[in-house]
Amino acid sequence: PFSGLSARKPDALLALIALHEADRRPGKIDVGVGVYRDETDRTPVMRAVKAAEVRLADEQPTKAYLGADGDVQYTALLSDVVFGSHRQEPRRFGLQTPGGTGALRLGAELIAHAAPDTRVWLGAPTWPNHAPIFEEARLKTATHPYFDMASGGIAFDAMIDALGDAAPGDVLLLHGCCHNPTGTQFTLAQWRELANLCNVRGLVPFVDLAYQGLGDGLEEDAAGVRQLLEAVPGALLAYSCDKNFGLYRERVGALWVQASAPGLTELVRGNLLALARSLWSMPPDHGAAIVRTILEDSALVMQWRDELDAMRARINAVRKALAAQHPALDAIAGQRGLFSLLPVDADAVASMRDSHGIYMPANARLNLAGLNARNLVAFAEALRPHIPA
Ligand code: PLP
Ligand code: TYF
């Protein structure tokens, strides 16, 4: 029955995990898949998460089914973190999803049901899973450039120029902060211009916020998104707790949809719940229960924020230290989040893997959290001969 299938490529980022694992060389360096690692190269469970898990194991009264929207108290408490003083918005409905990926896919399905011919504009380069998520939901995708390799910053004029081809009703996917893979971020002035563009051209922003707190801080990293949502009629926001709570495999996310009029919210809500039921019935509980347990308790919130601050401080310190190794790496100090694109080609990436056991995807995306005091200079030395003069 399956002979009609065509072969698919495995996910190159997830494939790096196994490749690095199989390498027996003691000095190997994993700067591939986007997982935070501490100074000792480990990804420990956060202390606030452990404490919440212990509490859940002791006190969780039942594991009986919830609804298709998952843990509604989780979504309510998380909306304080995401929206801050903007949390009261009657046009908005949010629900728990299996990770940011589930939120993106559910949002894609909602769009496909509302307007099947919608085109989704993705920045180039972006997270490699973005295009498949929208295309598997039967939507068309288009790309716009946004990255200036020479300066390591946003090529905003080129981006706006390319979006001149977008039609009313098209969706514009925007990273809320800490762009994957470029480490760039929009300024507040650019967010304002993007909101204007959406309003003038009738585009619908779909924000992907997967790294809140890993750039400049929880408030700072959400400021642009909050400003945008306030300024536009309709929008979607896919959120992931998998990085900022270190919950990766627990699959913790949420989708918020802002309708263009309060009267539409109920229609959106009913459609989201129906789509979620057919996709996963209800999201997995454990990770969201952990996040809720933390957010319900001010001591655990303090602990979580301290741990998140330490993660962010370490990433930004590694950024500074690496930038100091070579003038061509200057921009890395000003970029934010786990990733930067290095100014080298795929041959250089292959050579660094063969000769030094350094694991990076072919586009030379570096996960800065893979570097530490013991390997940073060795990494810079292995990189140096490949940097164009
Ligand atoms: N969006 C971006 C930009 C990402 O880098 C990731 C990484 O995993 C996701 C979404 C998906 O997050 P999750 O693991 O919660 O599905
Ligand atoms: O970009 C990354 O490395 C992270 C993790 O299919 C990831 O976002 C990568 C690929 C994938 C799922 C998660």
Image (cartoon, grey):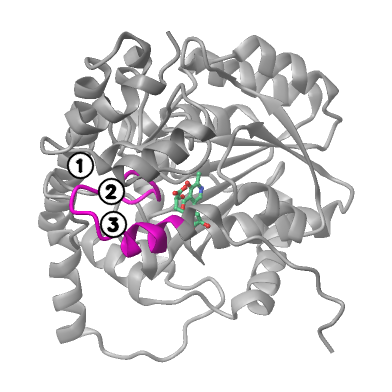
- In terms of sequence position, does the residue under pointer 1 or pointer 3 come before the other? 3
C-alpha gap between disc 1 and disc 3: 10 Å
Query: Residue 286: x, y in percent?
Result: 34, 76
Q: Is residue 288 left or right of residue 88?
A: left
C-alpha gap between disc 1 and disc 2: 8 Å
Magenta extent: 16-36
Q: Which three-letter amino acid code belongs to the residue tagged 2?
A: Tyr
Q: How many neighbours does mark 3 have within 10 angstroms: few (below 14), some (14-19), or many (20 or more)?
A: some
Mark 2: secondary structure: loop
Is residue 34 shown in magenta? yes
Q: As rendered, which of 211 and 149 lies closer to the eye?
A: 149
Q: Residue at x 63, y 48 (%)?
A: 130
Q: Is residue 4 left or right of residue 275?
A: right
Q: As rendered, which of 320 and 236 lies closer to the eye?
A: 320
Q: Which three-letter amino acid code belongs to the residue tagged 3?
A: Gly
Label 2 vs label 3, nearer the camera: 2
Q: Residue at x 82, y 58 (%)?
A: 138
Mark 3: secondary structure: loop
Q: Residue at x 46, y 24 (%)?
A: 185
Q: Would you say the residues marked 2 and 3 are in contact, meaning their CB atoms lie under 8 Å apart? A: yes
Q: Is residue 5 left or right of residue 133?
A: right
Q: Which mark is residue 36?
A: 2
Q: Which residue is mark 3?
A: 246
Q: How many neighbours does mark 1 have within 10 angstroms: few (below 14), some (14-19), or many (20 or more)?
A: many
Q: Which mark is residue 311?
A: 1
Q: Which three-letter amino acid code belongs to the residue tagged 1?
A: Met
C-alpha gap between disc 2 and disc 3: 8 Å
Image quarter (top left, top right, bottom left or bottom right) of the C terminus? top left
Q: Would you say the residues marked 1 and 3 are in contact, meaning their CB atoms lie under 8 Å apart? A: no
Query: Residue 283: x, y in percent?
Result: 50, 74
Q: Can residue 353 be seen?
A: yes
Q: Would you say the residues marked 1 and 2 are in contact, meaning their CB atoms lie under 8 Å apart? A: yes
